[in-house]
Amino acid sequence: MVKWMNKPESLLAAAALGLLGALAVLLNLTLASCQNSAAGRVGQTGVHGQPLARAPLPPPRQEFYGDRGPDLRVRIRSGVNSASIAAPAGEALMWPGVAWSSGASARTLRTAGPVEIRLVGGEFVLRSPQGEARVNAAEGLWAAPMPARSGSTPMLTLDGGPYPGKLRIVPRSDAAPGAFDVIEHVALEDYLPGVVAKEMLAGWPLTAFQVQAVCARTYALQERGLSLLRGEHFDLESTDRDQVYGGASANATAQEAVRTTRGLVLKHNGVILRAYYSSTCGGRTASARDTWPTGRGYEYNLAAPVQAHTRPTACDISPLHRWTVTRDRAELEQRIRAFGERQKLLVRRLRTLHSIEPMAFNADGRPSRYKVIEPGGTWYELSGEELRLACNNSVPASAAAAAGVGAPSAGLPIVDRKSRVHSSDFAVQVRGNVVTFTGRGFGHGVGMCQYCAKAFADRGEDWRTIVLRFYPGATIERQY
């Protein structure tokens, strides 16, 4: 559900960010989401709350949308070294500008079987039933479905999964030799069913799916506007760094939710809202301003509808409404130090953990900042999301070696679900070498709570009432 220090964690895992004036105009003209993320004190944040480093915004531009909404650029593979693209049986794919070794030559060629793609020595190498082809990686590579004789346009598949848009292959020299991204160009309304079906649990009521559809549309549109202005080669990740997207979805409830809310988004003072959401609030809401950056380019995190407020809650149906996890103290110290080193925070100096205590609370009584305390009384301040991310932080071998004091040379992987600190709302007890976290909720807790939405829907409430409860002061408006 959103990026940065703590992405919005989706329901699936639980059962699951110019200047104000210029940015407001931009987001209102061009364009907005969010569950539980994980990152540090860096740029923009996704629906789940992950941080992304971003440059200042250039001047806004105006554009207009059709019935399917604007095209999105969704990164569905990141830094991979191979991919297989195909069309349904009996259908074909178009490869603009590709000439095959079989002798076929045309500006746009069709292939009838799967095409295996690799990046070798600055060239994309394609192997298919038509033979082999090589394309200068600097020119880029596209694959698109060929319209069928029936007039319909079949969906292509990537590594066996169906996608409704066309695909662009982009080299990633910054990632590794031979690495590339696969970016799907897809209409917003065609993209949304694949998000709603992943962010909601199968069998949940249509009303809850409609709430999710409006939040996901709002987030995607706002994020697209920011990405375009910054000149990035994609708008959204297909993971919980933005919103979980699984390609085309046959889920009838997700399709109906998108259809019945088409073009509707959340706005505040005429500007598209960054509609954060997460799996389970645990009974206490969080503030975007406490969770993610609010400086230049991130003023949207100051919007009133995404701040903590007391509201009815009903997520006690979530398996992570309350939780307890235990961690090894030395291992936790290592993770916190490594996070501090990565984010250039003073907590990187932590030697021995004595206790962790809340030092500030938001308007709904949820801890927003914590003290990480050493035996001598020295303490380090972290936001709730920073601390959660630090506790779940992976530790590369190089960082482990630099940390000294018993740090295993192999480093530490990201923690598994069983021992993960699920939210930033917790109490901590340190006894000897054991650290016990007793917490509530799953994800960052800002904006919509998916399990609350489900429970409200079960009570018979309509989706508009539910949405506006999560974002008080916002309005639901038609963008296209």
Image (tube, rainbow, N blue to C red):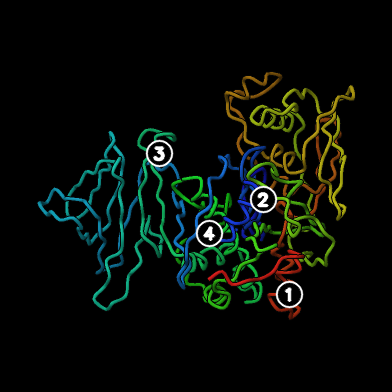
**Circles 1 and 4: CB distance less than 8 Å?**
no
Q: Amino acid at mark 1?
A: Thr
Dot 1 or dot 4: first in sequence order is 4
Q: Which residue is mark 1?
A: 465
Q: Quadrant of residue 408?
A: top right
Q: Is residue 201 visible?
A: no
Element type at marker 1? helix
Question: On the image, numbered disc 4 is attached to which residue?
Answer: 30
Marks 2 and 3, how far apart at CA: 34 Å
Q: Is residue 61 left or right of residue 453?
A: left
Nearer the observer: mark 3 or 1; the answer is: 1
Depth check, mark 3 against mark 4: the one in front is 4
Disc 3: which residue: 172
Q: Earlier in the sequence, mark 2 or mark 3?
A: 2
Residue 243: % across, % down: 57, 56
Instruction: Please say if 469 is above or below 419.
Output: below
Q: Secondary structure at mark 2?
A: helix
Q: Residues within 10 Å of mark 4 (few under 14, many from 20)?
A: many
Q: Position of residue 467 (x, y in %)?
A: 70, 69
Q: Nearer the viewer, mark 2 or mark 3?
A: 2
Whether residue 473 can be seen here: yes
1 or 4: mark nearer the eye? 4
Give the answer, above or below, for where 413 lies relative to 449.
Answer: above
Residue occupied by mark 2: 20
Q: Residue furthest bottom?
A: 460
